[in-house]
Image: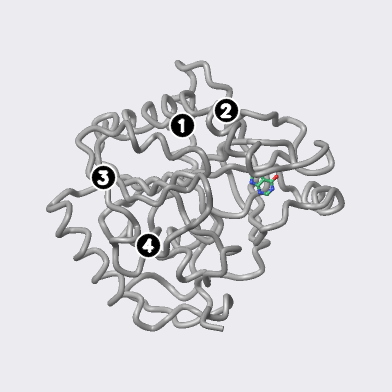
């Protein structure tokens, strides 16, 4: 067994590792100063392909970056501009269910903030639980339930990154949701809003689990985002979370497959790109 225990606590040399990573990226991109970092979920990566003035770096070329092998998660860090804003986008992410510990899963998110992004737009593909949702809808995340069964901040806390006990009352900044709604309106995009439940996966949920999550107040469910939002808050970045509802969660559909998830995300692609561009235009002001 060479793989590390997936519940490995946060390591003590995180700042040193981040500094090495940022230095290596800076050697590739010079003095680019991204204000906004984006994490693009399953099937939502194409947003990064249409950035202006792009520089793309494979995750495999970035020290300490974990590499995903999941289909639909390309694995590139892309610098560029959209809507007049300097951005850095993660095209693909790694997940806890792949066997990485949460410090590793969230290392790229920390890198975005360390590169200067103080706003993070974190997106995902999710199953709809609320009957207000339907396949193809985009949902602004108002809050989350961490049911991953672990927390990326467990273990050593380096005060240079953030406090031991971070506040999570505005984990998803309400003023960024206002910006998203004002971008959606002229595009006639009907945005939902709700609570995202983060689970470890990799199984999709049973019908009984979905019923439980509904009773707990969950509107959508997925296997990412929550650990990333925790470290973003730890580092005092403001977060906008957007779920693309790729399927209705188990119990409301006959059967679920990863292909359905990536197919729906592809159909939503142009709406999603238009919305993100509109949001960035507003953030540029
Ligand atoms: N459950 C969990 N994760 C998901 C789903 C789902 O239904 N759809 C996309 N990611």
Q: Residues within 10 Å of mark 3 (few under 14, many from 20)?
A: many
The Cα atoms of the two marked residues, 3 and 2, are separated by: 27 Å
Image position of 262 with respect to 97: above or below: above
The Cα atoms of the two marked residues, 1 and 3, are separated by: 22 Å
The Cα atoms of the two marked residues, 4 and 3, are separated by: 16 Å
Does label 2 or label 4 sit earlier along the sequence? 4
Q: Is residue 266 left or right of residue 175?
A: right
SS state under label 2: loop
Q: Is residue 90 left or right of residue 22?
A: right
SS state under label 3: strand
**Pick the front one: 61 or 27:** 61
Residue at x 61%, y 54% (from the top left corner): 223
Q: Which residue is mark 1?
A: 180
Q: Is residue 229 left or right of residue 283?
A: right
Residue at x 60%, y 31% (from the top left corner): 264
Q: Nearer the viewer, mark 1 or mark 3?
A: 3
**Pick the front one: 102 or 191:** 102
Q: Which residue is mark 3?
A: 79
Q: Are marks 2 and 1 in contact (CB under 8 Å)?
A: yes
SS state under label 1: helix
Q: Which residue is mark 4?
A: 110
């Amino acid at each position: 067994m060479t793989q590390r225990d997936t519940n490995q606590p946060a390591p003590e040399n995180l700042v040193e590792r981040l500094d090495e990573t940022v230095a290596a990226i800076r050697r590739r991109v010079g003095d680019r100063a991204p204000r906004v970092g984006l994490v693009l979920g399953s099937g939502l990566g194409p947003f990064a392909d249409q950035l202006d003035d792009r520089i793309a770096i494979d995750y495999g070329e970035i020290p300490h970056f974990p590499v995903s092998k999941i289909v639909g998660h390309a694995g590139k860090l892309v610098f560029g501009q959209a809507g007049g804003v300097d951005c850095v986008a993660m095209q693909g992410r790694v997940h806890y269910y792949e066997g990485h510990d949460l410090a590793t899963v969230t290392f790229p998110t920390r890198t975005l903030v360390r590169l200067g992004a103080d706003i993070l737009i974190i997106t995902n593909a999710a199953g709809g639980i609320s009957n207000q949702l339907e396949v193809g809808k985009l949902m602004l995340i108002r809050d989350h339930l961490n049911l991953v069964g672990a927390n990326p901040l467990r273990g050593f806390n380096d005060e240079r990154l953030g406090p031991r006990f971070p506040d999570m009352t505005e984990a998803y900044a309400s003023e960024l949701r206002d910006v998203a709604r004002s971008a959606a309106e002229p595009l006639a995009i009907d945005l939902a809003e709700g609570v995202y439940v983060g689970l470890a996966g990799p199984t999709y949920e049973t019908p009984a689990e979905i019923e439980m999550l509904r009773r707990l107040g969950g509107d959508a469910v997925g296997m990412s985002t929550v650990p990333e939002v925790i470290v973003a808050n730890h580092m005092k970045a403001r977060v906008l979370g957007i779920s693309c509802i790729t399927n209705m969660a188990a119990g409301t559909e006959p059967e679920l497959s990863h292909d359905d998830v990536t197919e729906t995300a592809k159909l939503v692609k142009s709406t999603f790109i238009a919305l993100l561009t509109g949001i960035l235009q507003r953030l540029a002001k």
